Amino acid sequence: MVVADGRRFAVLVEFAALAHPLVGVTLKVGAWRRMQEILRADALHVTAHSAASTFAVRAFDGRSPMVTVVRERGLGDRSLRSASRGVLATPSPGWDPQILRGAGIVSSASTGTLVSDPSVSGEPRRQRLQKQFSRAEARRRLAETQQRAATLPTLTPTASALLDGYMPTEIDATLWSELAPVHREIIARSGIVSPDAIRKARSVLAQFLAFRQSQGESLDVTKVCTVAAVDAYFARGMTDFAARTRNDYRTRLDRIVRAVNPGPDAPPKIKSKYYTVRPGYNDAEQAAMRRIAARQPRAGLKRQASAIVGLACGAGLDASDLRHLFCRQIIAHGDTGIEVTIAGTNARRVWVRREYEDLVRIGINGVSADHTLFGRGTEARNGINGVLNALVYVEKGLTFDAARMRTTWLAWLVTQPVSLRTILDVSGLQSARTLAEIIAVLPPTAPPEVRALLRGEAQ
């Protein structure tokens, strides 16, 4: 079934008779409401959300990979998150551990060609259009802005106390008496209310004003609070600061001047695309990481590196899971696999992929059941990165990152015939937002044989 915007939909068999007469017809909201009234007379309350949730339970039941269902249905981020809420509202059906091990399952989409730009995956994200304001609304907002600019905001008692007794040690008292009124006005107009934020802002702003005074520049608020003035201070007034301090100070000042003087003197920032999910590893990189972890010359380093790679890439454990993991939580069941139980607020149970079982066995070999794999306290907190940074024989261009290892496992999981409820249960995710971002960067897949599965026909 193809709808007006070109997206293709697979209809469940039992609803095909209802969908067929709708081909080429524009659906009316009134007809949907009349149908709701008829069903309500039979004590049935049906909404579009409940109907979509019902479909989600059926569509994501694990008979075909999640990535295939999403792309066959043309689901976006918002629709997928809504579907996950419907799935979580149903009881967990349970799952076969052998499926999570990857036993006898061939993925329909390889993770070996993960890309970082969704535009090349064939599934571009829908962009939300910016709301257009009427002329009356624009005039009202302009009047409000002008009124705020003409009135000096009143400082909170806490903010006033922090500024009244403030005296920078690096600025002469006489000079500070000249700068203090401007300093106070800028803080008041910036809208900063947090005591901690005020403490950070007052110091860097005082140094900025002192630099302007030393250069003979104007201390008028409209002249001080410009991006160009901050850039000049960054280029000529921070030469003695470390690079990290310079960037930090510039960020704070930029935020202040944009809040005080929004307009032509504060041009919009160029925003690049940002994805919360780190890119995963391809098949060749995974093979190299397994080989490198098992080849470490020191026994302790080899054991810990094998545990990290095996549990992160093979079972989706993140750094916080690994830090608090006791050896007794990893149970080897011989040829049937390795089971890992994660405790804490994100408690769950998962099985290790077959390709990584050997590494996990190396990682737990010789460790007492009551000991953690990476020490305790500060040792455990720094242990994960410390182990990964200490690796030798690492190939050029390959970096070991626990977050990317978990993404790799999730990318593998969504390409397997595993139900959405199972994926959420074993990964510890509370919604499908992360999964949607991963699916957006997976290579395009549309195997024709899965359409029968989507329609609920026998395999």
Image (cartoon, helix red, strand yellow):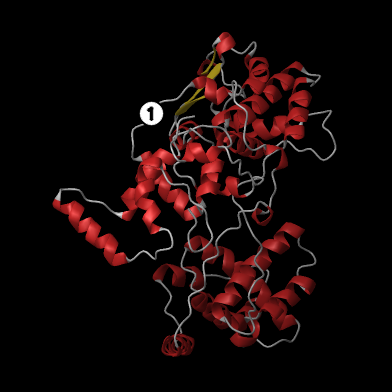
Residue 147 vertical placement versus 14 (above, below): below
Determine which residue is flagged by label 1.
Answer: 93
Q: Which residue: 67% across, 74% down?
A: 208
Q: Which residue: 64% across, 38% down?
A: 109
Q: Nearer the viewer, residue 3 or 412?
A: 3
Residue 257: % across, % down: 60, 76
Report which quarter residue 105 is drawn in.
top right
Q: Nearer the viewer, residue 281 or 39?
A: 39
For the question of whether residue 433 can be seen, the reply is: yes
Residue 48 vertical placement versus 424 (above, below): below
Number of numbered markers: 1
Residue 261: % across, % down: 57, 82
Residue 40: % across, % down: 17, 53
Q: Dot 1, crowdedness within 10 Å: few (<14), some or many (≥20)?
A: few
Q: Nearer the viewer, residue 97 or 242?
A: 97
Q: Amino acid at mark 1?
A: Pro
Label 1 residue SS? loop
Left or right: where 122 falls relative to 184: right
Report which quarter residue 223 is drawn in.
bottom right
For the question of whether residue 379 can be seen, the reply is: no
Q: Which residue: 60% across, 24% down?
A: 353
Residue 425: % across, % down: 45, 33
